[in-house]
Amino acid sequence: MTPHTKKLIGTILMLIWLVIYALVVSALAVRILPHAAWYVSLLFYVVAGLFWIVPIGLALPWMYREPKR
């Protein structure tokens, strides 16, 4: 697979992941946070704010890996 193709696929998948992740986290926040204590809200936002990077962090090395010859 060419580097350009890998970058295109990775970019599209990242955009899809971020949209789905934002919708899921927003839905969870609406259900959980209105009745939660401040420290639960803080923990929720810390975890939600950091977790989105895990799949992207796994995809970036794949996208930029040189093709095998």
Image (spheres, rainbow, N blue to C red):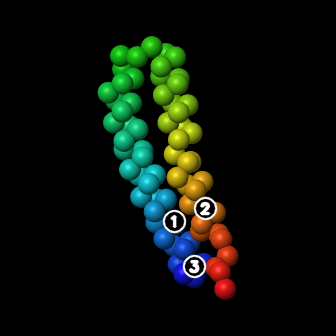
Q: Secondary structure at mark 3?
A: helix
In this orientation, which residue lies closer to the viewer: 26 or 54? 54
Q: Which residue is mark 1?
A: 11
Characterize the local packing of mark 2: few (<14), some (14-19) or many (20 or more) Cα atoms within 10 angstroms: some
Q: Report helix, strand or loop for mark 2.
A: helix
Image location (x, y in percent) of residue 38: 49, 16
Q: Is residue 66 left or right of residue 52?
A: right
Q: What amino acid is at disc 3?
A: His
Give the image location of residue 22, x and y in percent: 42, 44
Residue at image mark 2: 60
| Dot label at residue 4 | 3
CA–CA distance between discs 3 and 1? 10 Å
Q: Sequence order check: which comes first, mark 3 or mark 1? A: 3
Q: Amino acid at mark 2?
A: Leu
Using a 10 Å C-alpha cutoff, classify the residue at mark 1 as few (fewer than 14 neighbours), some (14 to 19) or many (20 or more). Answer: some
What quarter of the picture does the C terminus occupy? bottom right
The residue lying at 51 percent from left, 45 percent from top is 52
Give the quarter of the image for residue 57: bottom right
Q: State the mark number for residue 40.
A: none
Q: Could you tell me how far apart the alpha carbons at marks 2 and 3 are, in whole angstroms? A: 13 Å
20 left or right, relative to 42: left
Q: Is residue 45 left or right of residue 36?
A: right
